[in-house]
């Protein structure tokens, strides 16, 4: 079993290579807020695109949506978030630290002793995780709005619109990617749990009698998705929610967990939300959200929903942690990010062996040709070995080196990141070679 990367090592690589920076760093940073740098934003976009393609392009019965973050405040009353989206909190009267009552040892709760300083803890009280703000210039109860804590509600309130305008028939799904906000109390472990994050959610509308079948299908499909992305299966598992863990809307819930450097944690939730959300929105909006099923002899019903809810930013952390690898090559440490080529921020690094004798010009010609189809990075600075290492650290799967022979016969060296194997390839055949290698990519442990 390969050893696991330490979080400090990963955080430091992310900063050094332009993946992720602390937010507002020049002011000392803001707790739990992170910015995605040039490599990070490419990686995040690619993770998002991978998911979007999987959900919409590869499923003819799933369509997309992009709903707004601010919604009518009644949405959150109907959804149950105003009443139920809370964490139990306790404060230490001595050191003034605040803890989630369900995350400190039971013994401390029984004795009311602070787990940090032994001081006296207050009784637990419920704290709502939704951020509030005001719409318009007057800060009153009437102008109160929330930053959405999940993207799902934007889908439910548009259910009727999508049925009517996109002519979708049950069973069908609506997929959405977007920001969500939660006033989390414990935010640590880098981008794992933050107050501002992104979700990739899909709500699948079904006939109520088929919830078992669809739940099982989505559970398996979502697990396969991460394998397809190159995540190691040995670091993934399912966890079923017990009665005390279930969200207020869920009848059954399974998490896909990943073994992060800080332990097994939730990566994605698959929930059977029944007709809870649509029913509640019917009650609160007084609009008819039932569905007339002409494939079932005109039966009218409120569809059940199987939800697949993944964190985009949390998946980025998973991909980074899973990709990190160190090995010894010729007596030196090689750090390599074994990212799936579809996710790597740069697909091909192009290097002239030396700058002179027309090699730089030929290498730039190769870049101009490749960048129509691939993200490329041109680097002519320093020893070739060091240039390879820099690309290994950001996970660039292919390196193309232009040397003196290239001038003679228009061939180049193609280097594979994972095996470090180098093959001679005609410039004219590079595209096809790289495209094929991406298609055939398999993670080697
Ligand atoms: N719509 C259902 C829902 O939001 P959830 O289990 O609360 O369910 C789904 O969240 C996913 O969103 C989680 O599995 C996780 O990947 C991500 N997520 C939740 N809270 C997060 C946070 N504070 N920071 C980063 N990601 C978060």
Image: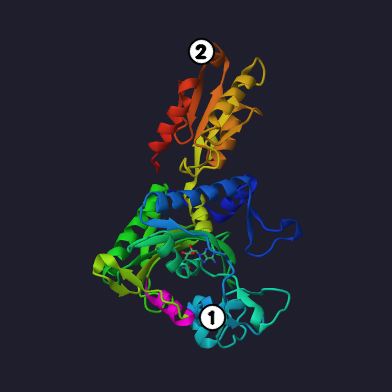
Q: Residue at x 59, y 67 (%)?
A: 195
Task: Residue 304 in the image: state x and y as whole percent.
Answer: 35, 71
Is residue 14 placed above or below 155 in the rendered structure? above
Q: In this view, does 438 lie to the left or right of 369?
A: left
Task: Residue 402 in the image: state x and y as whole percent.
Answer: 56, 21
Q: Residue at x 60, y 31 (%)?
A: 387
Q: Can residue 279 be seen in this view?
A: yes
Classed neighbour count for the residue bearing mark 2: other residues with Cα under 10 Å, few (<14), some (14–19), many (≥20): few
Q: Residue at x 47, y 58 (%)?
A: 260
For the magenta stretch, what is the residue range?
Answer: 273-285
As helix, strand or loop, the secondary structure at mark 1 comes to helix
Say whether marks 2 and 1 touch (CB < 8 Å): no
Cα–Cα span, label 2 and label 1 = 70 Å
In front: label 2 or label 1: 1
Task: Residue 421 in the image: state x and y as whole percent.
Answer: 45, 28
Q: Which quadrant: the C terminus?
A: top left
Q: In this view, does 149 lie to the left or right of 236?
A: right
Classed neighbour count for the residue bearing mark 1: other residues with Cα under 10 Å, few (<14), some (14–19), many (≥20): some
Q: Does the magenta stretch include residue 37?
A: no
Q: Nearer the viewer, residue 382 or 68?
A: 68
Q: Earlier in the sequence, mark 2 or mark 1?
A: 1
- Dominant secondary structure of the residues highlighted in magenta in the image: helix
Q: Residue furthest top?
A: 408
What colour scheme has been applied to the protein in the rendered image? rainbow
Q: Disc 1 designates what residue?
A: 82
Q: Which mark is residue 50?
A: none
Q: Disc 2 designates what residue?
A: 409
Q: Is mark 1 within 8 Å of ligand 1?
A: no
């Amino acid at each position: 079993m390969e050893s696991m990367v330490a979080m400090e090592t990963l955080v430091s690589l992310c900063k050094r290579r332009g993946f992720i920076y602390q937010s507002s760093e020049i002011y000392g940073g803001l707790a739990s807020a992170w910015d995605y740098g040039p490599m990070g934003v490419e990686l995040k976009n690619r993770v998002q695109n991978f998911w979007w393609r999987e959900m919409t392009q590869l499923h003819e019965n799933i369509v997309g949506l992009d709903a707004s973050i601010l919604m009518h405040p009644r949405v959150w009353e109907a959804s149950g978030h105003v009443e139920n989206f809370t964490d139990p909190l306790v404060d230490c009267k001595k050191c003034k630290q605040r803890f989630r009552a369900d995350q400190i040892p039971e013994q401390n709760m029984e004795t009311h002793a602070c787990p940090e300083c032994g001081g006296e803890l207050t009784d637990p009280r419920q704290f709502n995780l939704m951020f509030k703000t005001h719409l318009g210039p007057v800060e009153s109860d009437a102008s109160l709005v929330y930053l959405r804590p999940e993207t799902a509600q934007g889908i439910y309130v548009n259910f009727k619109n999508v049925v009517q305008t996109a002519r979708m028939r049950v069973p069908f799904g609506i997929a959405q990617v977007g920001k969500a906000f939660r006033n989390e109390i414990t935010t640590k472990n880098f981008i794992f749990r933050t107050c501002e994050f992104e979700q990739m959610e899909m709500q699948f509308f079904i006939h109520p009698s088929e919830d078992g079948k669809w739940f099982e299908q989505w559970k398996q499909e979502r697990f396969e998705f991460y394998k397809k992305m190159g995540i190691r299966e040995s670091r993934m598992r399912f966890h079923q929610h017990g009665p005390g863990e279930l969200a207020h809307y869920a009848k059954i819930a399974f998490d896909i967990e990943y073994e992060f450097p800080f332990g097994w944690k939730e990566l994605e939730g698959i929930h059977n939300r029944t007709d809870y959300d649509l029913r509640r929105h019917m009650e609160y909006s007084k609009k008819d959200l039932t569905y007339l099923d002409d494939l079932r002899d005109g039966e009218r019903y409120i569809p059940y929903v199987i939800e697949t809810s993944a964190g985009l930013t949390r998946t980025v952390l998973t991909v980074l942690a899973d990709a990190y690898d160190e090995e010894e090559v010729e007596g030196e440490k090689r750090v390599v990010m074994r990212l799936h080529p579809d996710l790597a921020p740069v697909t091909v690094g192009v290097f002239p062996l030396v700058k002179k004798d027309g090699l730089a010009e030929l290498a730039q010609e190769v870049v101009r040709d490749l960048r129509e189809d691939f993200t490329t990075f041109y680097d002519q600075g320093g020893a070739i070995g060091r240039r390879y290492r820099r690309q290994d650290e950001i996970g660039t799967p292919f390196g193309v080196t232009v040397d003196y022979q290239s001038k003679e016969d228009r061939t180049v060296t193609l280097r594979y990141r994972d095996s470090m194997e180098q093959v001679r390839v005609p410039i004219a055949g590079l595209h096809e070679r790289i495209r094929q290698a991406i298609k055939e990519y398999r993670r080697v442990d």
